[in-house]
Amino acid sequence: MNTAPIPAPADEPRWLTAEEQLVWRSYIEAATLLEDHLDRQLQRDAGMPHVYYGLLVKLAESPRRRLRMTELARYAKITRSRLSHAIARLEKNGWVRREDCPSDKRGQFAVLTDEGHEVLRRTAPGHVNAVRQAVFDRLTPEQQKSLGEIMRIVAEGLEPGETGADLPWLR
């Protein structure tokens, strides 16, 4: 008598095993709680959500504290529409300004203002403390390294290089 499992039809999903379900649900729970934790800290300390803070950081790290809007959307992994809304809010606060791109009449730069740079300077210590307490203080150096490697593999797999990929910043 043959006891080999009968293969599922080709159109049948590859359901997660019990162990994979546990890993997946742990990831979802941790990611949701972490994003909420960081959002609350930044709302309390600076009146902005985590995604806005990330935009300001990227601009601060860029040459002349400016970056094309398309590149900023790519970095933040958000749609151009969501980025435009975020930049409008940051402009209203005086933390960012837009500049037209001289080489491309349709293009714009987002530029971190001195006031925006000062907000980052004041907010960064609390933010790094929140990140450290929530993530790094809970993990051994080996776990930190493994987490970094795992997240890089997942991110690389979700960001295909081919033209026409359905990525948020292209929408």
Image (cartoon, rainbow, N blue to C red):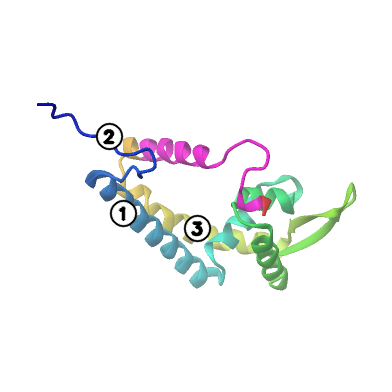
Mark 1 or 3, nearer chain start:
1
Q: Mark 3 is on which residue type? A: Pro
Q: Is 106 displayed left or right of 154 in the figure? A: right
**Label 1 to label 2, Cα distance in Å?**
26 Å
Tell me: 55 left or right of 44: right
Reading the chain from its start, which is encountered first: label 2 or label 3?
2
Q: Position of residue 118 (x, y in %)?
A: 65, 62
Give the foreground label among 1 and 2: 2
Numbered tag placed on residue 78 in the rendering: none
For mark 2, does the 10 Å Cα neighbourhood hold few (<14), some (14 to 19), or many (20 or more) residues? few
Q: Position of residue 14 (x, y in %)?
A: 33, 42
Determine whether label 1 and label 3 are within 8 Å by CB: no
SS class, disc 3: helix
- Magenta range is 144-169
- x, y (%) of residue 96? 72, 63
| Label at residue 7 | 2
Query: Could you say where residue 74 lies in the image, as x and y percent from the top left?
Result: 64, 48
Residues at discs 1 and 2 in contact (Cβ within 8 Å): no
Quarter of the rendering containing residue 149? top left
Residue with the mark numbered 1: 25
26 in relation to 39, above or below: above
Amino acid at circle 2: Pro
Q: Residue at x 73, y 45 (%)?
A: 63
What SS does tag 2 mark? loop
Residue designated by label 3: 125
Query: Separation of disc 2 and disc 3 at Cα?
Result: 54 Å
Residue sticking out furthest to the top: 1
